[in-house]
Amino acid sequence: MSRQRTYYVYTMASKGRVLYVGVTGFLMGRVLRHRAGEGGEFTRRYQVHRLVYFRFVSECGGCNRAGEADQEMAAGEEGGVD
């Protein structure tokens, strides 16, 4: 029997309100890496260090499902959800 993985879809923000949406299997470690400047070029450039939102996504459908959740969150933030 295979172990079901849990993914986290998360949003981080900078002081200037630049948003970054990502997917990871280990949220705390990923947040700490962003804060240490070990994230991607985008998060380093815009100093995106504050975790503002996250949610769990099960492996049902694999990363496709996590990626879909990532896209939903990005679309909602861009569209100004009430």
Image (cartoon, helix red, strand yellow):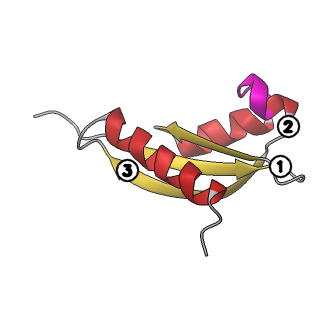
67 relative to 37, above or below: below
Residue sitting farthest toward the bottom? 82
Which residue type carries mark 3?
Answer: Val
Residue located beneath label 1 in the image: 14
Q: Residues within 10 Å of mark 2 (few under 14, many from 20)?
A: some
Q: Which mark is residue 46?
A: 2
Residues shaded magenta:
37-43
Residue visible at 73% across and 36% down in the picture: 34
Q: Which mark is residue 57?
A: 3
Cα separation, mark 1 vs mark 2, equals 7 Å
Residue visible at 23% across and 44% down in the picture: 60
Mark 3 or 2, which is nearer the eye? 2
Residue sitting farthest toward the right? 16
Q: Are marks 1 and 2 in contact (CB under 8 Å)?
A: yes
Residue 4 percent location from the top left of the image: 24, 41
Residue 54 percent location from the top left of the image: 55, 56
Q: Is residue 25 left or right of residue 19?
A: left
Q: Is residue 33 left or right of residue 10?
A: right
Q: Residues within 10 Å of mark 1 (few under 14, many from 20)?
A: some
Mark nearer the N terminus (1 vs 2): 1
Most foreground residue, 58 or 28:
58
Most foreground residue, 35 or 53:
53
73 relative to 49, above or below: below
